[in-house]
Image (spheres, rainbow, N blue to C red):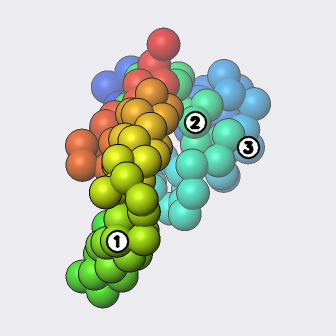
Amino acid sequence: MSAACMAKGLSYAEVGRLTNVDQAQVSRIVRGQFKRFSSNVIQICRILGVELPVPLPKAPDEGEWTAAFASVQRLINQSEDNGTTVSRLLNAIADLQTVSGGDAHQRKTTSVAE
């Protein structure tokens, strides 16, 4: 963000005035000294034309995958339709995640410059 601030020829005071954020906080944010994407961080990024990465959810570890597969296998074994209902349910969940942007296998970037 510091490079974007310099490239736009803006001082921290000017960024603060444009975003209604205190100059000291602008200085910390532009130097990367923040832990979460607060509204102030987003406002500053918007003014500077900086894109924010959308964090990916934590990938499950091997034990979580094993437990999930065991649960699915148990559901299939107990079903009367050889797992057709379980399969349809899992596909419906996957479709909902895709529609809501929950694809954890692809890193996305959100532009706040709009």
Residue beneath the point at 57% across and 49% down: 37
Report helix, strand or loop for mark 1. Answer: helix
Which of these two is toward me, 104 or 10?
104
- Toward the top, the furthest residue is 114
Q: Is residue 104 visible?
A: yes
Q: Nearer the viewer, mark 2 or mark 3?
A: 2
Query: Which is closer to the viewer, label 3 or label 1?
Result: 1
On the image, numbered disc 2 is attached to which residue?
A: 42
Q: Residues within 10 Å of mark 1 (few under 14, many from 20)?
A: few
Q: Quadrant of residue 82?
A: bottom left
Q: Is residue 67 left or right of residue 37?
A: left
Q: Above or below — where is 56 with respect to 10?
A: below
| Disc 3 residue type (three-letter) | Asp
Q: Is residue 1 visible in this depiction of the protein?
A: no
Q: Look at 43% across and 48% down and name the residue there.
A: 85
Residue 4 pos. (x, y %)? 35, 31
Circle 2: element type: helix
Q: Nearer the viewer, residue 40 or 92?
A: 92
Q: Position of residue 33 (x, y in %)?
A: 50, 62
Residue labelled with disc 3: 22
Q: What percent of the width, then of the height, locates residue 10?
A: 48, 26
| Residue beneath the point at 75% across and 30% down | 20
What residue would you read off at disc 1? 77
Q: Amino acid at mark 2?
A: Ile
Q: Quadrant of residue 66?
A: bottom left
- Residue drawn where x is 42% and y is 59% of the image: 80
